[in-house]
Structures are given as structure tokens and as C-alpha cells.
Amino acid sequence: MGDSMTVGENPLLLERQVCFALAVANRSVLKIYRRLLEPLGLTHPQYLVMLALWESSPRAVKDIGHVLQLDSATLSPLLKRLEGSGLVMRQRRDDDERNVDIALTPAGRELRVRALEIPPAVVEALGVDLSDLEELHAVLTRVNAAALRAESAGR
């Protein structure tokens, strides 16, 4: 690579890399979430599990893993910690004991009220217009879908 290459021509500039921008954004945004979730006693991954359960409870472990795109080796410790915190409980299915549902406890349902403060607090901490975040979400959703398709196709 010669010095005569312009910034626009150099595809390997760090500042042009999507992976770098995503990694920095991920770290920055998760730092904000960590600060906001700490008073709730939740880590960000635990918060994601709780979001899934606040949408629908009880919910099969397999379904939670699918929705959050987490394998059981990652999900199981999260569920154990949430259970230890008294926020969720495991329930074996009557029709098939191999399948386990996760249900919110009363404390888990009550925590939802406090969690309602998290999304607006994140928007405020970021200092970005909500419309920009909605547009970013739409773009990232398309990128994630494309990445899944590429992975499935073995690219």
C-alpha cells in the first residue's frame, strides 16, 4: 500500500470498518445500560431474559434461547442467577418433563414497573433523537437478518 492512496480508496482504514463501529457502539451503549440496570440488580444479559419474560410468561427455555439468539450454555447460567435472585422459577411441563418453562415470580413481575424507566433513561443518556435510534434499530435488524442468512448459506 502506497502513501498515494486517498482515505476514500483505503478499504482497510479502521474508521471505515463496520465491525469497529459496531464494537465501539456496543461497548458504549452497554456501559450506559450497566449503570442503569445496576439499581435493579440486573446485568444486561439478564435484562434481555426479563424482557422476553415480560412479553410472555411462562415461556419455554428453548423459546427464550431462540428469541435472544443464545445457546443453552449461555442461557442456563443466566436463568440460574435470575432464579437465585427470586425473579423467575422453573416449571417442568406436565405433558413432557424434558421441557422446562420459565415463569416470572411476583418479584419478577413487580420489577417490570421499575424497568419501564430504562428505555427513556437510555435515550436521555445517549442524547440522540429517538427517531435516530429507531432508524438505527431498523438498519441493525436488517443487518442481523442478512448476517443470519449469510451464516445459514455458509458464506
Image (cartoon, rainbow, N blue to C red):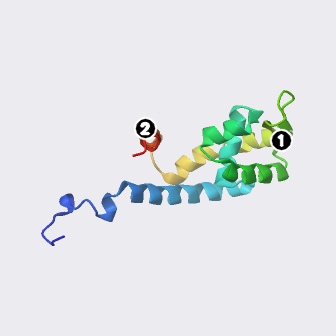
The CA distance from mark 2 to mark 1 is 34 Å
Instruction: Residue 40: tell me if it is visible.
Output: no
Q: Is residue 87 left or right of residue 139?
A: right
Q: Label 1 belongs to which residue? A: 90
Secondary structure under the numbered disc 1 in the rendered image? strand
Q: Residue 119 placed where, x, y %?
A: 60, 44
Between residue 150 and residue 136, name the one nearer to us.
Answer: 150
Instruction: Name the quadrant containing residue 88.
Output: top right
Q: Residue at image x 18%, y 59%?
A: 9
- What is the residue that sits farthest to the right in this orientation? 94
Secondary structure under the numbered disc 2 in the rendered image? helix
- What is the residue that sits farthest to the top in this orientation? 95
| Amino acid type of the residue tagged 2 in the rendering | Arg
Q: Is residue 6 left or right of residue 82?
A: left
Q: Label 2 belongs to which residue? A: 142
Q: Is residue 31 left or right of residue 138?
A: right
Q: Residue 76 placed where, x, y %?
A: 74, 50
Q: Is residue 6 left or right of residue 61?
A: left
| Amino acid type of the residue tagged 1 in the rendering | Arg
Q: Residue 106 placed where, x, y %?
A: 85, 39
Between residue 124 and residue 92, name the one nearer to us.
Answer: 92
